[in-house]
Amino acid sequence: MCRRRVSLRPAPSSGRQQEAVVRAHHGYYIPDKLEEFGPTFLWVPLKPGRSLMDWIRLTKSGKDMTGLKGRLIEVTEDELAKHNKKEDCWICIRGFVYNVTPYMEYHPGGEDELMKAAGTDGTDLFDQVHRWVNYESMLKECLVGRMAVKPIAAPKEITSVSEEKKQLNVGHGVCPSGMLPEKKILGASSKDLTPSYDWFQTDSLITIVIYTKQKDMNAELVILDCEDKLLRGEIIVDDYSYLLEVDLDRAVQEYVAVNIAEKVGKVEIILKKKDNVHWKILGQPLENHNTFMKRTDRGLFYRKCKLVSKTEVTHDTRLFCLLLPESTHLRVPIGQHVYLKQIIAGTEVVKPYTPVLPFLPLDFQEPSCHDSAHIYLMIKIYSCGLFTQALDHLQIGDYISVSNPEGSFKKSQVQTSEDLFLLAAGTGFTPMVKLLHFALTEVSCLRTVKLIFFNRTEDDILWRNQLQQLALKDERFEVQFILSQPIRDWVGKQGMISSSLLSEFVKRSRKDSKVLICICGPAPFTEQGVQYLKDLGYSQEEVHPFTA
Ligand code: FAD
Ligand code: NAP
């Protein structure tokens, strides 16, 4: 039988620790002021029969989930506000209203979290906590209808639909951009930052040039896909995304090249024509073409990647190697994750995973050679896990959807550090892999790099040999394994994350060393670790918790 493992711990009992507890959360605790480190989301233990799979089954059962017998209605703000109780709860997300009453007991964050948006527009709250969750698919049977549009004063100038749909840049040779009405989702003050583009052609190639006005452009900031005639590009400029979305005039080959002039911030996208004929236009603009919007406001874009290998890491963890399409340019930056999407029992399910390297390189002479065609994911398969069970059933050659990268970690956080501490629990090791390699290879000011790796048993330790070899090879690096449930004669350290343990292992190498402490594992582990570090006097800038 499948037993739900609740990895959250009961609130601590010692007097000092109890002071840190500000609010009980279904028997678990969120340490004081943790919100400073970003939005928090804790799982609560769900009642038996209330898993995501159970929810999917319920939605497929034919039960009337909205109480409207399948009818869709227009919902006014007043009407929405009336449905604000647990037993009658409607929530609006991006203009669509859902009756989430039947979902209450299935919500992994608990009923109270859901109730925060009861009878209101919950879009912002939803985006803060789990923007990536595919609610359209999960809640489709709960759809009540759309919000009624409020009458608004007519705008001074209306851009006609036919104008919006105008073809892109007619003519040949270098064409100026801006022949379309600009559709940028930014205030006037940001206008200077807005990239622009041109395109030109030779007999065999189409070149699109984007002027980003960003000095330190690099390959990780450009994500590109070209499938059939559809071109989709995202250029990241600080916290904003510039999007190119074009239905190309003619077919191109399954190939893209990206050239970047880093110093001037110019990006060239090169496509190979399928038939060497002259293009009169680049193509038709799609909805988000030539827009510049906050990164967090653009949707997640997925492409299908092929599973090319699956290798054992431990008894329950595997290294999945995915091949990107030839016409995709995507590099996942250090400390960022991607979302995988699978259809499970007819519902789209999305989960985040942090790419790793295929192994820990021991040669630090040169920065790692970038294998940009593959994404490696180290994934623990849970015996009752909805998503990981489906992943484990994928066959070599099968395809899975992979999103653009997301995450808040910036390389610059480690580039000036002298001491780097990595606190990892279980698969919380994954963001540490690329970070460790980058630190030892490219950060010359680092004096010490210490990984403190928490696992239950010896058999659970990921890449133990590789880590030990790395420690032998590089005297700056040290690894400490700590087991919570050792089963054989374990001479190493035993225990859980605690203030005393952190004060023993996390120490500046010099009194005024610049330190960075990265922490990742089960959410309560990360949250407790952050609190202990704060209690030990480390500042917010010195601690980076990895979360979704
Ligand atoms: P679920 O069906 O969600 O269940 C997993 C386990 O948790 C089961 O044992 C289940 O019984 C238990 N469980 C589920 N819900 C609850 C609940 N409400 N209360 C208590 N217990 C519960 N994982 C990796 O292996 N590798 C990675 O690189 C990785 N990167 C991540 C990056 C980020 C940013 C985040 C947030 C998570 C990452 N994860 C990673 C975790 C991953 O996203 C999934 O959560 C994990 O794979 C489990 O998915 P699942 O659907 O198989 O399991
Ligand atoms: P696990 O095996 O359950 O736990 C690893 C170690 O952490 C064990 O020693 C365990 O001790 C300890 N631990 C578990 N819960 C704890 C808690 N509440 N407080 C203190 N210690 C705790 O870990 P896992 O199954 O690999 O899970 C890894 C987690 O990391 C997942 O939740 C995943 O979502 C997360 N993750 C996040 C990111 C990210 O945000 N970027 C990336 C990768 C993974 P005991 O089992 O003995 O209690």
Image: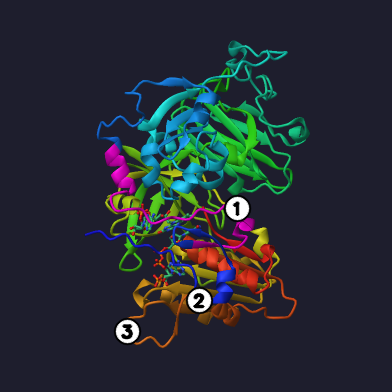
Q: CA gap, disc 2 to disc 1?
A: 27 Å
In the shown orientation, is residue 236 left or right of residue 359?
right
Percent position (x, y) of residue 461?
40, 73
Q: In which quadrant will I find the N terminus?
A: bottom left
Describe residue 257's horizontal placement relative to residue 36 as left or right. Answer: left
The local crowd at label 3, few if under 14, some if 14 to 19, many if 20 or more residues have their Cα within 10 Å, is: few
Q: Nearer the viewer, residue 521 or 267?
A: 521
For mark 2, give the secondary structure: helix
Question: What residue is shown with label 3?
Answer: 488
Which residue is under mark 1? 408
Q: Which of the 4 quarters of the picture holds residue 367?
A: bottom right
Q: Picture coordinates of residue 158 (x, y %)?
A: 67, 13
Give how far apart the Cα atoms at labels 3 and 1 are: 39 Å
* Closest to the observer, 533 or 44: 44
Q: Assess mark 2: CB under 8 A from ligand 1?
A: no
Q: Which mark is residue 470?
A: 2
In the drawing, does residue 353 fall left or right of residue 37? left
Mark 2 vs mark 3, CA separation in Å: 25 Å
